[in-house]
Amino acid sequence: MTTSSSKKLPSNRLGIFLLALGLAAPLGQAAEVELRLAIPEAPFHVIGDPVPLRWEFVNRSDQRLAFMWEGCCRLNGRVTASLGQLTLHSDPATSAAQLTAHRFARAARLLPGKSAVFETNLGDWLNIDRSGEYQLTARYTGLLDNQQPQVAPGWQLWRQTARSNPVNATLLTPTAYVAKRTTLSQESGLLLGLSKTKKWDPIGGAQLELTFGNQADQALALAWPSAFGLWFLNDNSHRVPLTPTQVETGPEELTIEPGDQHKRIISIDGSALDSKPFGAYRIFIDHKTGAHRTPSNLIDIEWQLRQTRVAELIHAASGGAKTGLRNKPLKLLRLHIASIGPALAQVPTATLDAKGQRLLAELQLAAKLKPYGPKPGRVTLKLAIEKDGAIQFADQALAQMLPKRRSIIGQLKAILDIRRHLGWTVAVEIQSKPGVSKQQTDQAFKSLKHLEPHLAKPLKIN
């Protein structure tokens, strides 16, 4: 499938154009495609799970039909969810990444009387954050005006819109699901109790203890840990994406007799929240089988880098990477450099050795400069040559962040020394102001030339 942004042709010219390409003309109004929407039957689904949303297109015509399937950008397809007076609509994607992915959507074909099925997740279409029994409907347009699948002669192009009948699904927020813990435990016979045996540590993570209790009148057989999921919730009670979902431990088949308990330790690596914003998080364990689903209680986790912890990380990071390992404390400090400025300012230098003091000074400067280039990548620093031949930063706000005791060359070198803390590559552009002589320009260029090996591209004078 390819997309085109070319000017739309009049209908009569469009038919000639398609025939010249060996393609069939658009299908007439007599064609019919039936759209069926389905969600797996279950007493409820938990928001944050990959809830399957199945699209089935049935060709009710006697023609071979071609259309474009895209479940990435919500352009051809739309989903609506209704809960009482609340109605949610899927919106077309706007991010560059999704729109780029849309160009790689694929041409789909429907033989007469046959169907094509596409699997998506409900979360691909809608952001739902309220519990309740929803009624879901969908519509899908086979081809938009700027879409042209490459198909062989004899295939008709389906450009019409199909609409599904409503389907119902009960959706629970994670906290509403955990609130049903007692009732669900009575139904399954399994009671899960989670406790914290070690506080959250940015390097070591956390250690939890999970207790399995059998409330049933017969033995329970549990597949540990494959039947159990790990849930991280943020302070809005939403499941945190890109966090671990599986318990990392060796597999066991647990048999728990009626009235008995088993305990297992769960270790969570500190990298689980490495790149996540600071704040209050909660964790629970979810047991899920074909017949039953049971959550544990919630455990609170505080994820912060305060002054004492920052000082410890600097002390560990200034020693360099261990043999065969990356310098994880330094990586963590760099990841959160935009947020730990106040904590860095409070770290007492007397508690650090010379290497630690030097690293602290670099990180303090990096925290000041981070707003100038929040995203990793190339940052272009613009310099101006004044009438007297002096070199100044074009952005005076940037100049105010840099060490005042240093010359412009020293300030540039200070930025280059800390660019790795910021994830920057640095380029320098020089602007000569009116009245600056060629000799002054050449002298300024010569004074900066020795920095060029550390720059992302050669020096440039405008």
Image (cartoon, helix red, strand yellow):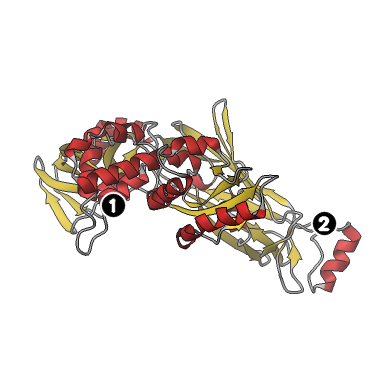
Of all residues, the one furthest to the right in this rendering is 12
Report, in whole angstroms, how far the alpha carbon at label 2 lies from the one at label 1: 50 Å
Can residue 232 be seen in the rendering of this structure?
yes
As rendered, which of 342 and 230 lies closer to the eye?
A: 342
Amino acid under label 2?
Lys
Q: Which quarter of the image is occupied by the N terminus?
A: bottom right
For the residue pair 235 and 276, the one nearer the viewer reads as 276
Which of pointers 2 and 1 lies earlier in the amino acid sequence? 2
Q: Is residue 427 above or below residue 86?
A: below
The residue at 66%/45% (across/down) is: 433
Question: In the image, 341: left or right of 396?
Answer: left
Choose top left, top right, bottom left or bottom right for residue 435.
top right
- Tag on residue 88? none
**379 displayed left or right of 172:** right
Q: Nearer the viewer, mark 2 or mark 1?
A: 2
* Residue labelled with disc 1: 246
**Residues marked 2 and 1 touching at CB (< 8 Å):** no
Q: Which residue is mark 2?
A: 7
Question: How many numbered discs?
Answer: 2
Q: Which corner quadrant of the image does residue 324 belong to?
A: bottom left
Q: Is there any visible trace of residue 292 in the rendered image?
A: no
The foreground one among 325 and 149 is: 325
Q: Position of residue 134 (x, y in %)?
A: 51, 35
Q: Is residue 267 left or right of residue 60?
A: left
| The image quarter in which residue 113 lies | bottom right
Q: Is residue 283 left or right of residue 434?
A: left
Q: Looking at the picture, does residue 152 appear above or below residue 306?
A: below
Residue 62 at x, y percent in the picture? 73, 65
Mark 2 residue crowding within 10 angstroms, few (<14) / some (14–19) / many (20+):
few
The residue tagged with tag 1: helix, strand or loop? loop
